[in-house]
Image: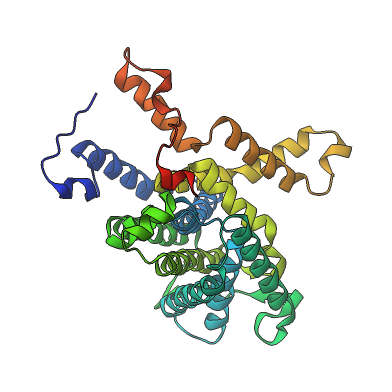
Amino acid sequence: MRFIRKTNYYQDIQIFKHEGQIFWYTCLVLTLFFLPFFLSDFYLGELALVFIYAIAGIGLMLLTGYTGLVSLGHAAFLGIGAYTHAYLLNLGLPFMFSLSISVLFSGLIGTLLAIPAMRVTGIYLAVATLAFSIILEQILSHWVSVTGGYRGMLVPDPYLGDVSLKSFTTFYFVCLIFLLLSILIAINILRSPTGRAMTAVRDSEISAQSMGINLNSVKTIAFAISAGFTGLAGGLLAHKIGYLAPDGFNLLMSIQLLLMVVVGGLGSLHGAIYGAIFIGFLPQALALLRDNLPERLAHIPGLEPGIFGLILVLVLIYEPLGIYGRWLKVRSFFEEFPLYRNSTHKRQRSFLKTERLR
């Protein structure tokens, strides 16, 4: 068992809690950088997709996991980032410049959405974001002069200066670097006063407001940051799929993103990464399942959304802390053995009056 002795306040907001984390995270990053020398192009493409999902998961985790705002329309921000980036590339703008504009534009749309959405909470907020996603899908379908409508939009090959980013290996490194930067930015946001205010709003809006926190400002900032991260993921996803269509950013994609953060573990950046790995390799598992099912069952309409919903319900019932929560329990068992108690991770009853009033 590791005992961490804290002697000052700044130890609570350090990026790494102890030297062991520095060692293991360094080994993980080095392993990811050397993987392209041992894996085929297929697996590099799948890992790049996992990195893109992880960036989108970080954005949704900041909104849902750390601020407590449920969104069923984050596929819309993914589509905004993808279409904006592809449109600017078709105009001849550089890769980094168009990607930056897509991030800023997605954040701006997220801010504008947050202004009316702040009037509602809970399930009503989820319905409002779902309505926004449906509206955006219709805009992408009928704004033919910009998006190409149902014909879709071809995404140009990415170039960084004169260097092509089209190859699997190069695109893998681009996605990995953006993921590492996104994790670092998210960690620093959570360490800042804004991040602590977001966590306070999630825990108890009444208590946060009594401490002088402006709820609307914090929620609007959370929406903007979350939309910006998701827009970045959308820009990278555009190069991964190569061709954009309006039906690619529908309700199923929003459910996948929500499933990612819930299954991974709400309230943890680790959960966003674990959830991205789960979602990234779930289609291959579903393809294998279809091959082994009877023909009648394999061609049932809506089979994939049904399986996503079933997994979400099972996780909420049997493992509400997600994959990362299960890992914490396993780690605690080995650290505290033989003194581990099964009641260590049980939910504690809330006795705060402000919590009962919510």
Q: Residue at x 48, y 77 (%)?
A: 108
Q: Quadrant of the N terminus?
A: top left
Residue 175, x across and y down, in percent? 44, 59
In which quarter of the view is residue 86 placed? bottom right
Q: Residue furthest top?
A: 338
What x and y, as percent, mark residue 192? 27, 60
- Is residue 146 shown left or right of residue 195? right
Q: Judge by depth and name the residue closer to the eye, 201 or 130.
A: 201
Q: Quadrant of residue 331?
A: top left
Please identify the residue farthest to the right as the structure is shown.
Answer: 296
Q: Is residue 37 visible?
A: no
Q: Determine the residue positioned at 59% across, 36% down.
A: 315
Say which of 46 and 3 sits in front: 3
Q: Is residue 170 above or below residue 7?
A: below
- Residue 135 visible from this viewpoint: yes
- Measured from the top left, where is residue 238 in percent x and y? 57, 68
